[in-house]
Amino acid sequence: MAKYGMVFDLDKCIGCHACVMACRAEWELPADKSRCWVKPIGPENTPYGLASTFYIGLCNQCEEPSCVKECPTTATYKADNGAVLVNKELCIGCGNCIIACPYGARYINEIDKKVDKCTFCEGRIQRGEQPACVKTCPTNARIFGDLENKNSAVYKKVYEEGAVPIATARVNLHPNVFYLGKERDIHLIADSYAPAKNDVSISNQLWRIFSPLVVGGASASIIAAFIAFANQIRKGEQTEEDE
Amino acid sequence: MRPELLIDQYPLTEDEKNELKSKKIKKYKFSIIWAHWLNAFAWLVLTVTGVAIINNDKYNLVPLGFTQWMSSLFSSREYLLKFHVWLGIFWILDLSLYVIFGAKRYSPDIKSVFTIDTDDRAWLVSFTRKVMGLNYTFPPQGFLNAGQKLVAMAVFTMTPVIMITGLIMAFQLLPPFFIRASILIHLLAVGAVACALPIHIFMGGCKAHEHESLKSMITGYMSEYFAYKHNYKFWRDVKKAALANKRENP
Ligand code: HEM
């Protein structure tokens, strides 16, 4: 089984948004939503000089996805091919994963009211095609492939040309999406869009506190009922007069 | 029968005991019996399927093995969730009929469930003393004793909460914040009732006393003797009403 990843070559991106349009068209998304984004940033000073680039992004399909941990129904899961997917039949649209994702890669699709995100174009890749955004990119700024295949372009970009993920020492979920380009541009993106601390919703935090209480209370009640029943059997059936 | 029996719960003579034991008093109508058992069935199945639904490494109520077993029983986790939702809807529809057609008829009964009087308070104290092995005497009780009232209160208040939060989660009726809140509130509401249910099932289903209580929830009738002992004020009111009726329509 392949383990898919993607590399963005920042030097090639011209900010045309064709990838965003292709994504929207491929997945028939609401007009204001897309599973990937292109955000112009800069010009700004960085330690490596003046930088100006596009922050191209999509779900990082992290190795240790924080979203998966926060999904109460396990609708969100890590597929064998490395993509993080949402099983819409199990998703109840609670948005705990949206809060947990430090990259803002998830949103509620207003059409089905469930969570939506990049799947690396599941379906297309199963048919051996490239994801829609990759296929559409006129400058080949997006490179998609198998990170475990030494002959693949992504493998070379990551392990030979030194493409890097956007992560920090504090928040490193081991993304499978990498950036290649001038040091100053990567620095600007990493600085401006550093992954925020992956959050746990208040309701999920409270759930962790209350669920043991509920389980404990119900179990105590079951035990009390059993003890009472055992006592009744031990003492034999009491008649009304004994009461 | 001595007239003073209609004034207070006096100890019975052997003859009176035998007379009351041979007579039956109607406690539950068929519609209530039907509602109770359908509700009980729905509760038991909804609880076992419900606890299996939420299960990942961090959030769970039962061991993963139980979830896997339930999922295989329903062929997959998706079908387990679907079954839970559709049984829930069936439960809501069934009980809604009672609200639609019975709201007027049953509202005095519901009101009395929510009234805890001096006797009820005394009953709760006696019950606690009994559980602690101290000496106790039970005051006369009405249609339901105070313990049953507490169960009924929990059931009546939590049921709509469980239904509404369930619908919000199942059909994404409100924005995500409320869906998240619903997950928590659903758990707490079910939990409040689930803490009382095992005791209720023991008291109603397993407790001896010739199973008069259980019989009343199956046939609608219990022995007058049992009613006199356990639901004296209810027994007295039925008797008084019967006497008044006899006087008016001799
Ligand atoms: C198999 C399990 C159950 C058994 C054997 C059982 C048995 C009984 C019996 C015998 C009564 C009549 C008590 C009396 O009038 O003396 C009763 C009443 C009642 N039951 Fe159940 N029950 C069961 C499950 C449930 C469940 C799951 C619920 C609700 C969640 C419930 C709610 C009630 C309520 C509200 C009453 C009326 C008053 C009270 O006793 O609190 N029961 N039950």
Image (spheres, rainbow, N blue to C red):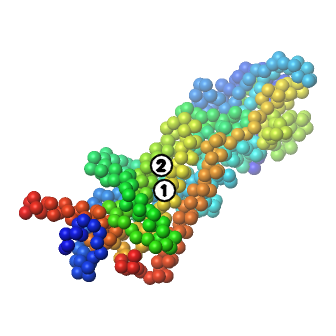
Most extreme residue toward the left, as rendered? B250
Q: Which residue is mark 1?
A: B193
SS label for mark 2: helix
Residue hosting label 2: B162
In the rendered view, would you say A211 is above or below A146? Answer: below
A156 on left or right of A29: right
> Can you say whether B166 is above or below A219 in the image?
above
Residue ID at (86%, 27%)? A187
Residue B23 in the image: above or below residue A199: below
The reply to whether residue A205 is in sight is yes
Between marks 2 and 1, how big is the CA–CA gap? 10 Å
Question: Where does residue B119 sit, x and y in percent of width and height?
Answer: 37, 60
Q: Is A109 displayed left or right of B25 in the figure?
A: right
Q: Nearer the viewer, mark 2 or mark 1?
A: 1
- The yes-or-no answer for disc 1 within 8 Å of ligand 1 is yes
Residue ID at (85%, 35%): A164
Quarter of the figure with the C terminus of chain B: bottom left
Task: Mark 2 vs mark 1: tell me if same chain.
Answer: yes
Q: In percent of the image, x 53 and y 73: which residue is there?
A: A227
- Write down the quadrant of residue A44 in the picture: top right
Residue A106 location, x and y as percent? 66, 35
Ligand 1 found in image quarter: bottom left
- Horizontal and vertical percent for residue B156? 41, 52
Using the rendered view, name the quadrant where residue A236 is placed. bottom left
* Chain for numbered disc 2: B
Q: Nearer the viewer, residue B133 or B158?
A: B133
